[in-house]
Amino acid sequence: MTNPARVRVAPSPTGDPHVGTAYMALFNKAMADTTGGKFLLRIEDTDRARYVADSERQIFEALKWLGLDPDEGPPEHGPGGPVGPYRQSERLPMYRKAAEELIAAGKAYRCYCSEDRLETLRKIQQAEKSKLIGYDGLCRSLTPDQVRQNEAAGKPSVVRFKLRKEGDIDVQDLFRGTLKFIGNEQQDAVLLKSDGYPTYHLANIVDDHAMGITHVIRAEEWIPSLPLHFELYRAFGWEAPVFAHMPLLRNKDKSKISKRKNPTSLLWYRDAGFLPEALRNFLGLMGFSLPNDQEIFTYAEFLQNFDLKKVNIGGPIFDLQKLHWLNGEYIRRLDDRELERRLVDYCKLLLGREHEFADLPEDQLPQETFLKDFEQKRRRWSRTLGTLAAEIMTSYEVNPNLLLPIIPLIKERLHTLAEAADYIPMFFTNEFAYTREMFIPKKQTMEGAILALKEVRTIVDRVDLTDPAAKEALDAACRETSEAMGQKLGPFLGPVRAAITGATVSPPLMESMIVLGKDETLKRIDNALNFLALQG
RNA sequence: GGCCCCGUCAUCUAACGGUUAGGAUACGGCCCUUUCAAGGCCGCGAUACGGGUUCGAAUCCCGUCGGGGUCACCA
């Protein structure tokens, strides 16, 4: 076992909690947990323009939902910790001091170039197809006098890092070995913005050092700024942590996972009825695998086999279809009581939110077929359950066993909690929009349908549905009758299914009738018979 | 375009330099069946290409091609 690792996930509160944040949280947390270390959450809120007030709370909630709570982080949402504040906006003096230090040491300088000049510069460089695109270091050569004049004139400035221009910058990456960068191809990055806030580059180094971070496990997209970060550590005279750049989660077209092409919000997954443990498991499958082809595992099992070096760095495509399957596996593994509880909680989550799940116009729907289809369905499901939510919740409180008998009937049919919307409503209402067609499936006729309904009515009337053997009794009687009528059981039960469930697809019929009870079952059959009588 | 990273079935992945390249999802078929599922069985399907090194390469080296990331006072 290695030394205890101090690792962190450092999201920026600029929007919905991102699936990539959860991905990084999982691997960072695993690193901490397998070494007896600590997993910290740091809020990188140094961009006041993109700041979203509620985002931080949502990030916390989402991580907690996934069981990826930090060991240390802002005390408002969790345990706090000894190296706070854990919110960068509360650490401004440290960044200023660090920047001043570098300026004093001649390793950074004030830059007074206007946004306009920078933009023009960039345009010229692009027009000239210059190999080097970026700041030209103009203000490096400002004399102390010029700096004083600028300051006296109150000219806004940023602080730039004086990046080493000669020689190679070699940095180790845990997965890739030595990464070589050419010094003079790097540019003088901004450390402190004109509003006094630090950029990611400065804040990240100052904080990781101050917080004792030993391993920086972050997304691959940071590799290009690695030489800058490494040189910053050198400039401060600090030891650099171990860098491990994880692969990027990808869209189907292999581009970096994005909102337009994939659901990226963790809230989306929760709202769509995915179980947190399934999503977490799925994320663990991205770039990592357990021995013996084990694909379904607890976090504890993940830890037992975790080895950061075994991460596969080819960028994995986030395949919602496989998550869909995995979620179904998790649902089937839940015991009935637990699934019941999850469903009630899920309804609670949807309560009063039907308006959020209105149908989307074609042009706002995802392109990809599975996702498009799923998005449409899950919106419908969410509306259905949202409408039913209050009723389900109160019934559950009044009678904790109300839903329970239904669970075994639907469990193996679910891939997401939302999908329960296809099966549950029939247990709460008998106001169905019957259509003539649903009573006459293949190999069935109107006459046959009416006869089947009457026969089954007689059977149900005769059998004691509260008897433990009721299912077998119904089954036997129905088989006997259908045989006598010269019908297969399927077509024979078709009209009955329509009568009882109001649909052609439903949970198992006998069990459904038993759950509904004799009175309700007979009533529905009578309703159907009346409906068909009117059809002529 | 410059720099950097990556490259095993459509997808997630396995394979001390020696396997008929394995598993899972998806897809197709069959079985089971009370609709839909779930489950069982079978099938389809990959080492990007070209050179080396080696008795032997998916595995090591080089090149090509392909994909991706990044080039902000965003992270």
Image: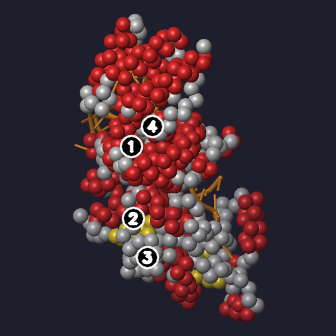
Dot placed on the residue nearer the N-terminal end, 1 or 3? 3
Q: Chain ID for label 3?
A: A
Find residue A427 and name its label.
4
Q: Disc 1 versus disc 3: distance between alpha carbons?
A: 39 Å
Decide: is A375 above or below A283. Answer: above
Residue at the image position 74 percent from the left and 86 percent from the top: A155
Residue A346 in percent (x, y) is at: 46, 50
Amino acid at the residue labelled 3: Pro
Residue A330: which quarter of the image?
top left
Q: CA distance from mark 4 to mark 2?
A: 38 Å
The span from disc 1 to disc 2 (Cα, nearest Å) is 31 Å
For the residues beneath circles 1 and 3, the answer to whether they share a chain is yes
Question: Which x, y percent locates residue A98?
Answer: 52, 84
Q: Are marks 4 and 3 on the same chain?
A: yes
Q: Are marks 4 and 2 on the same chain?
A: yes
Residue type at tag 4: Phe
Quadrant hosting residue A46: bottom right
Residues at marks 1 and 4, CA–CA distance in whole angstroms: 9 Å
Disc number at residue A69? 2
Can I make out residue A140 in this image?
Answer: no
Q: Name the residue nearer the viewer: A155 or A529.
A: A529
The residue drawn where x is 27% and y is 45% is A291
Q: Are marks 1 and 4 in contact (CB under 8 Å)?
A: no
Label 3's element?
loop
Q: Report, in whole angstroms, how far the alpha carbon at label 4 lies from the one at label 3.
A: 45 Å
Q: Secondary structure at mark 4?
A: helix
Q: Could you say which is closer to the camera, residue A89 or residue A440?
A: A440
Q: Which mark is residue A75?
A: 3
Q: Amino acid at mark 2?
A: Asp
Q: What secondary structure is marked by label 2?
A: loop
Is disc 1 placed on a helix, strand or loop? Answer: loop
